[in-house]
Image (tube, helix red, strand yellow):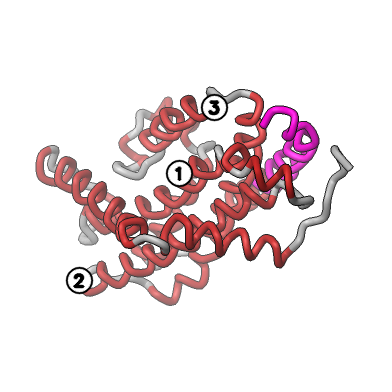
Amino acid sequence: MKGMRRKFDRVFFQNLVSRQIRQDYLENLTGFAWLILQPLILLAVYAFVFSTIFKARIPEAGDIGFVPYLAIAFWPWIAFSEAVLRANGSITANAELIGKVAFATEQIPLATVTATFLMHLAGYMAVLVILQFMGTSIHWLYLVLAIPVILLMWVFACSIALFTSAIQVFVRDIAQILPPLMTFWFFTTPILYSASYLPASIQGVAEWNPMAWFVARLRELLLLGEINLGLDALIIVMFILVFSWLSLRFFRRFSGHFEDFL
C-alpha cells in the first residue's frame, strides 16, 4: 500500500550497489578510467598551484611533503563529495523503479553512496601504494584504524544523501544548489592547507566541521603514525549517529509521497 514503510532487503540492496557500479564505472572504459584520472588531475593541478606557484609549506607535515599531505585528505573528500552529489538525484533518476517495484526507497541513495565509496576506496588504496613507491612512508598498520574512520565518513555521506535526495523530489533546485555548497565546504575544510593557518577567531568554529576531523585523523594515522582519538571522536560519532537517525526518519516521513511528485 502507498505510504506503508517497507523492510530493508539486503539482497536487493546488493543488487542495487552492483548495478550502480556497473552502470557508472564498469560498463564503459572511460567511466572506470575517469574514476582514477579525475582525482589525479585535480590533485596535480592543486599540487602545482600551491606547491610551485604559492610555495605552500605545511609546518606539521615536516619532511612528508605537500603532495602526500594533500593526497591523503583529497581522495576521501572526492569520494564523499561525489557520493553526496550522485545520490542527491538518485530518487528522481529511478522514478520508474519506484513506481513498479515495492521496496524500501531509502536503499536507492544508500546504494549510490555505497557504490561510489567502494570504487573510490579502491582508488585510494592505489594512491597509497603509489605514494609509498614515490618515497612517502605510509603507516600501513594504522590502516586498520583508518578504515573505521572512512566507514564513519560513509555513514555521514549516507545521512546527507537521505536528507537531500528526499528534498530534491519536491524541490528540484537542490540539484543546482548543492554543488556550490559542496565546493564551499571543500575550501573551508583544511585539505589544501593546514588548520593552523586559520585565524584564531575562526579555528574554534572550524573545529565543528566534521570533515575537518576526518581529514586530520586520516593524516595522523597514515602519514604520521599517530593515534589521537579522544573526546572529540566520541562527539563526532554521537553527532553522526543522531544525524543518521534523524535523516532516515525524515526520508521515511516523506517517501510515501514520492510517487505523487515523480
Circle 2: residue type:
Gly
Q: Residues within 10 Å of mark 2 (few under 14, many from 20)?
A: few
Distance from the alpha carbon under mark 1 to that under mark 2: 29 Å
Magenta span has 19?
Answer: no
Task: Report the residue at 30% width, 52% height from top.
Answer: 39
Image quadrant containing the N terminus: top right
Distance from the alpha carbon under mark 2 to that under mark 3: 43 Å
Circle 1: residue type:
Ser
Mark with earlier residue (3, 1): 1
Mark with earlier residue (1, 2): 1
Say which of 93 and 182 sits in front. Answer: 93
Circle 3: residue type:
Ile
* 199 in relation to 92, above or below: above
Please give the label number shown on residue 174. Answer: 3
Q: Secondary structure at mark 1?
A: helix
> Which numbered disc, 1 or 2, marks the residue closer to the eye?
1
Mark with earlier residue (2, 3): 2
Residue 33, quarter of the rendered image: bottom left
Point out residue 258 in the picture as x, y percentages from the top left corner: 73, 34
Please give the label number shown on residue 135. Answer: 2
Q: Residues within 10 Å of mark 1 (few under 14, many from 20)?
A: many
The part of the chain drawn in magenta is 240-262
Mark 1 sits on what residue?
81
Residue 228 visible in the snapshot: no
Say which of 100 and 129 sits in front. Answer: 100
